[in-house]
Image (tube, grey):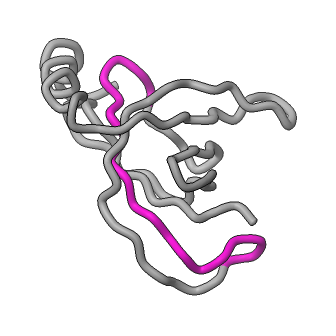
C-alpha cells in the first residue's frame, strides 16, 4: 500500500497515462505460469552493464504506472515494444502512482 493511497495515486496515474505507452506486465504465479496484465510505461533510459547469469548486460529502466495495483516485483517480467525483459529491480513512490523498474532482456 502506498502512503497516499486512493485519490492521489489515481489522479497522478490518470494525468500521465496519455503520455505513456502500452506494455504487458507478466506477474509470476505459482509454478511456471505468468498472469498477463496491461500497463502503461515510459522508457526512462537504457545502458550497458555487466552480464548476469542467463541475462545479457543491456539494461532498461522504465516508469510503470501502478495506481490501484501492487507494483511489479523482481519475480515478474515485462514486454515492451522491443521485447520481453526480466525485472531485476523495482523502486516505488510513496503515493503508489508508479514504479521505477529496471529490466534485462530475456535471451
Residue 34 percent across, percent down from the top left: 73, 31
Quarter of the picture holding the N terminus: top left
Q: Is residue 17 left or right of residue 88?
A: left
Q: Quadrant of residue 5?
A: top left
Figure check: 82 above or below 31: below
How many marks are shown on the rendered structure? Answer: 0
Q: Quadrant of residue 9?
A: top left
Residue 72 percent across, percent down from the top left: 50, 39
Over which residues does the magenta segment extend? 52-70
Magenta stretch encompasses residue 67: yes
Residue 54 percent across, percent down from the top left: 77, 71
As drawn, which residue projects farthest toward the top?
7
- Picture residue at 63% right of the left edge, 35% below the top: 26
Residue 93 percent across, percent down from the top left: 24, 42
Magenta stretch encompasses residue 79: no
Figure check: 46 above or below 100: below
Figure check: 35 above or below 72: above
As drawn, which residue projects farthest toward the bottom?
50
As drawn, which residue projects farthest toward the front?
81
Task: Give 76 or 57, whichever is nearer the viewer.
Answer: 57
Q: Quadrant of residue 107?
A: bottom right
Figure check: 72 above or below 56: above
- Picture residue at 54% right of the left edge, 76% below the top: 58
- Picture residue at 48% right of the left edge, 83% below the top: 48
Amino acid at each position: 500500500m502506498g502512503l497516499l493511497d486512493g485519490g492521489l495515486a489515481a489522479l497522478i496515474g490518470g494525468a500521465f497515462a496519455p503520455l505513456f505507452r502500452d506494455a504487458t506486465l507478466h506477474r509470476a504465479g505459482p509454478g511456471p505460469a505468468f498472469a498477463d496484465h496491461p500497463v502503461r510505461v515510459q522508457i526512462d533510459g537504457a545502458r550497458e552493464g555487466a552480464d548476469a547469469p542467463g541475462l545479457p548486460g543491456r539494461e532498461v529502466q522504465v516508469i510503470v504506472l501502478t495506481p490501484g495495483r501492487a507494483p511489479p516485483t523482481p519475480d515478474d517480467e515485462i514486454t515492451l515494444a522491443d521485447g520481453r525483459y526480466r525485472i531485476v529491480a523495482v523502486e516505488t513512490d510513496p503515493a503508489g502512482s508508479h514504479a521505477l523498474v529496471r529490466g534485462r532482456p530475456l535471451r
